[in-house]
Amino acid sequence: VQLQASGGGLVQTGGSLRLACAISGRSVSMYSLGWFRQAPGKEREFVATIMWDGGRTSYADSAKGRFTISRVNAKNSVYLQMNSLQPEDTADYYCALAKNPFGGSIYHTLGSQYAYWGQGTQVTLSS
């Protein structure tokens, strides 16, 4: 299983970026998908997750109202639309595929709930 994240770059404060993650080697249709980020000198933190059916999502407080996670199962892909970006959003962003299928009503907000990770895509904010 491989995850390939893309879409990062240098953006001005207040700008937008759309991250994409393409998954190969497994159909993602039964699995939750998530985005995490790690800023320089800080631990990795949860950003957003979307359940297997695409109908339920959960966000970190820092992402609520600004970021939107979505998925297209037919393309085996997950996306993160980021608006109103701020300097504190500067980080490497990682997509991840859950360990277990479905998961009921449990949102996957912990790194330990994921089995596979992408290589990261860097997002840098300029003032």
Image (cartoon, rainbow, N blue to C red):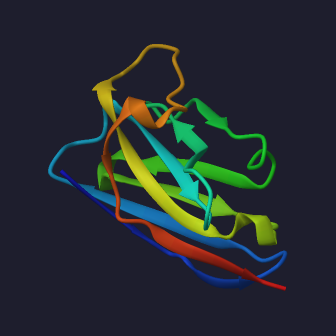
Residue 89 locus on image (x, y percent): 72, 65
Residue extending farthest to the left is 25
Q: Residue at x 35, y 65 (%)?
A: 119
Q: Residue at x 30, y 25 (%)?
A: 100
> Total number of numbered labels?
0
Residue 58 locus on image (x, y percent): 64, 34
Residue 9 locus on image (x, y percent): 58, 82
The image quadrant of residue 12 is bottom right
Residue 93 as seen in the image, left or right of residue 2: right
Is residue 98 visible in this depiction of the protein? Answer: yes
Residue 73 as seen in the image, left or right of residue 93: left
Q: Residue at x 51, y 32 (%)?
A: 110
| The one of 104 and 1 positioned closer to us in this rendering | 1
Please, is residue 65 above or below residue 29 in the view? Answer: below
Residue 83 locus on image (x, y percent): 75, 65
Residue 101 as seen in the image, left or right of residue 91: left
| The one of 115 and 32 positioned closer to us in this rendering | 115
Q: Residue at x 41, y 32 (%)?
A: 112
Please, is residue 104 above or below residue 19 in the view? Answer: above
